[in-house]
Amino acid sequence: MDGDLAPLGQLAASAQRHDAVLIVDDAHGFGILGQGGRGIADHYSLGSHELPLLIGTLGKAFGTAGAFVAGSRILIDYLIQFARTYIYTTAMPPAIAAASLVSLQLSETEDWRRQHLRQLIKQFRAEAQALGYTLMPSETAIQPILIGDSRQAMRLSAALQARGIAISAIRPPTVPEGSARLRVTLSAGHSEDDLARLIEALAAERPLLAGARTETGARNE
Ligand SMILES: *Cc1c(COP(=O)(O)O)cnc(C)c1O
C-alpha cells in the first residue's frame, strides 16, 4: 500500500537468529527491482541462504497469471505433495506458460523499460510535490498521494475518473485511520504524455483539497 521496501536484510538476519522461517512474497518487486528484474532478493543482494522461501507472481509486471515458489528441493517436494491449493488447482495453461517465458526474456533483456519507469517515478514525485501534494517515501511504482480524510480522497478520485484517469482511493481499514490516499500506480506502459495528463488533472483538481491535511505528517502508523 505504501510502495515501500521491506528491510529484508534485517528481517533475514532476525529470522536466522530466532530459527524462524522467512517467507518473502515479491509480487511487486519481481520484474521491477534488481538486475534484469530479478526482484527484491537481487536488489538487496540476498541469496537462498538468507531467503530460503521466495514467492513471485506472474500477474503483475509479467502481465500473465500464476506464480512460483522458489526454495530447496525438499521444500518444493513437500509443497507438491501437501499443498492442497496447489494439488487441487488446474495447472497453468500452456499458452500462459509460453507468454510467461516471453515476459521473462523481455524482463532480462529490456532494461530500458525499467529505466523508463524509474524516470516516470522521479518526474511524478517532483511534479506532484510541486503542486503541494504529500507523497510517501516510496521509490517504487506505487506512489500514494496522502490525503488524510476519506471523503476528500473519494472526491478527488471521482474527479480524476471524470477526466479519464483511474486512481482508486484507499481508505481505512485497508490503511490506518486518517491516512486515506490515492494509490497512483505507474507502469513502464505509461508514456510521458500519460504522466503529463495526470499532472495536469492533479493541478486542476488541487482546489478540492482546500483545508485538507496535505502538507506534512498526516501519516499515522
Ligand atoms: C497481487 C499479489 C498477490 C497475488 O497475485 P496473483 O496474481 O493473484 O497470484 C500475492 N501477493 C501480493 C503481495 C500481491 O501483491
Image (cartoon, helix red, strand yellow):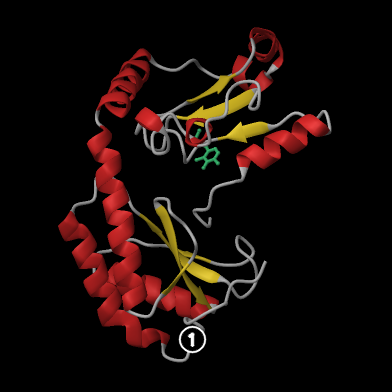
Q: Is residue 139 above or below residue 41?
A: below
For ligand 1, tell me if the residue under mark 1 lies within 8 Å: no
Assign the C terminus to one quadrant of the image.
bottom right
Is 176 positioned to the left or the right of 41 in the image? right
What residue is at 39 percent from the left and 70 percent from the top?
A: 157
What residue is at 50 percent from the left and 36 percent from the top?
A: 40
Q: Where residue 133 sits in the image (x, y, percent)?
A: 40, 76
* Residue occupied by mark 1: 212
Q: Where residue 73 sits in the image (x, y, percent)?
A: 64, 8
Q: Is residue 10 above or below residue 97?
A: below
Q: Is residue 170 above or below residue 112?
A: below
What kind of residue is marked 1?
Answer: Ala
Is 184 positioned to the left or the right of 112 in the image? right
Residues packed near mark 1 inside 10 Å, few (<14), some (14 to 19) or many (20 plus):
some
Q: Where residue 156 sits in the image (x, y, percent)?
A: 38, 76
Kind of element beneath mark 1: loop
Q: Where residue 127 sits in the image (x, y, percent)?
A: 29, 70
In the orientation shown, which residue stands out farthest toward the bottom?
211
Name the residue nearer the viewer: 91 or 62: 62
Q: Is residue 50 above or below residue 60?
A: above
Quadrant of the image occupied by residue 182: bottom left
What residue is at 32 percent from the left and 28 percent from the top?
A: 107
Name the residue nearer the viewer: 127 or 104: 127
Quadrant of the image occupied by residue 22: top right
